[in-house]
Image (tube, grey):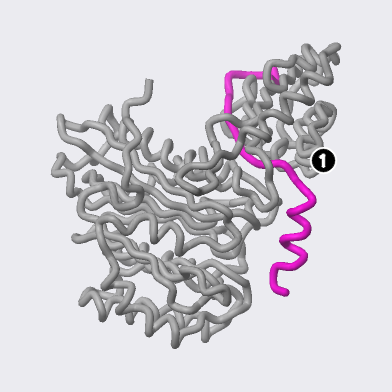
Amino acid sequence: MADWQMISGGITAPRGYKAAGITAGLKPSGAPDLALILSETDAIAAGVFTTTVVRAACVDYCRQRLQKKASARAILCNAGQANAATGEQGWQDALDTAGWLAAELNIDPDSVLLASTGVIGQRMKVDAFKAGIPQLVAAASETGGDAAAQAIVTTDLVTKSIALETQIEGRPVRMGGISKGSGMIHPNMATMLGFVTCDAAVSTVLWQEMLSRAADKSFNQITVDGDTSTNDTLIALANGQSRTSAITEMGPEAEKLEAMLTEVCQYLAKAIARDGEGATCLIEVQVTGAPSDADARQVAKTVVGSSLFKSAIFGNDPNWGRIAAAAGRADVPFDQDKLQIKLGEFLLMDNGQPLPFDRPAASNYLKETSANSSYEKDGKTLHRVDDPVIVAIDLGNGSGSGKAWGCDLSYDYVKINAEYTT
């Protein structure tokens, strides 16, 4: 049983945080495009970023800031322009935007972290950006989490937000998170954009280690299309406003906090995978019997990223041969004569042997899961992340286990990306 409960409030549920989201005029659509997450006090900051050599200016900026100072007061995020592959001018734009916010808040520019999302190769609309800063700061409130979640999206169909609460030393400790992502999803570090706030007190080294491990079990285990973004950024703040004792080493309290951080990251990661461009369902691949947990995660992500497998799921085709083929090319050794594959409750292969199964029923399982994966609430379309298509693979070759999440590949994915900049 989970040692926490889900609460409302999203990114501002933890004590001492405010957020805002406004329309500054960065997006041609006129949709909200500038977000702020603000801690009332200095917060321990950790980050995980894209490993691609073509990086956005905000990624290099945050890396440098966190190496210099592992704390922050604010996260400033724009949507519309990625500020990636924009050269020296893009770097100066990053410095300028951080400086404008710092001046408005009367804080050190080194206390500002940045994130951007949008079209690669386009500079940010700096005039509109600068003009929007005072409005953004004025809008920051303890109820601004939903507005911030809306302001960071691009092709997303839904916003992604969560908040959890646990008890440490008899006091409530809260953690909130928001993320965005729908296409160009194949993280090789962390996520597209993800932000986590927490009111626990934790050491800088431990918080960074926790975030890195949580990323490996969540955002690094999702894929929509196999394309890693230039802007992948995951930032987590912990401001200590719960007034609990500082957690400085691994132990029961640290394990509880890390488990909650992993849960927040996995929820947001699954929400991104379910909202994949053109997707109709979430897919969860569970791998056991691997030589190590890392090997299991590698097989799971290889399978869930297979275009042939994803296409079969979209077509409600229980073509398990594509699962076996993808597992075999994951560069993880196993004996194919021990391989077992299940789709939902349907056992398709056991001990390397294909088994007879009810193909129409298996196809109907895929069809029903897709049909039930979205629902309406308060006039909004929401996506379920707790009822995915389940693929279970046992390699029969060790005690390692791991999971990965993705989505089906539909006709709409090609349409969305064929027309992305036109």
Measured along the vertical axis of the image, is residue 92 above or below residue 223? below
Q: Quadrant of the N terminus?
A: top left
Measured along the vertical axis of the image, is residue 212 above or below residue 387? below
Query: Residue reaching furthest front?
Result: 379
Q: Residue at x 67, y 34 (%)?
A: 371
State left or right for residue 112 relative to residue 337.
Answer: left
Q: Residues within 10 Å of mark 1 (few under 14, many from 20)?
A: some
Q: Secondary structure at mark 1?
A: helix
Asked if residue 416 lies in the magenta stretch, the reply is: yes
Q: 360 or 332: nearer the eye?
A: 360
Q: Is residue 13 visible?
A: yes
Q: Residue at x 32, y 26 (%)?
A: 3
Q: Residue at x 58, y 25 (%)?
A: 401
- Locate residue 74: give its quadrant: bottom left
Q: How many marks?
A: 1
- What type is the residue that disc 1 sits on? Leu
State left or right for residue 393 relative to residue 239.
Answer: right
The residue pinned by badge 1 equals: 308
Q: Which residues are magenta?
A: 394-422
- Locate residue 214: give its quadrant: top left
Q: Residue at x 65, y 57 (%)?
A: 184
Q: Quadrant of the C terminus?
A: bottom right
The x, y position of residue 220, in whole percent, is 56, 45
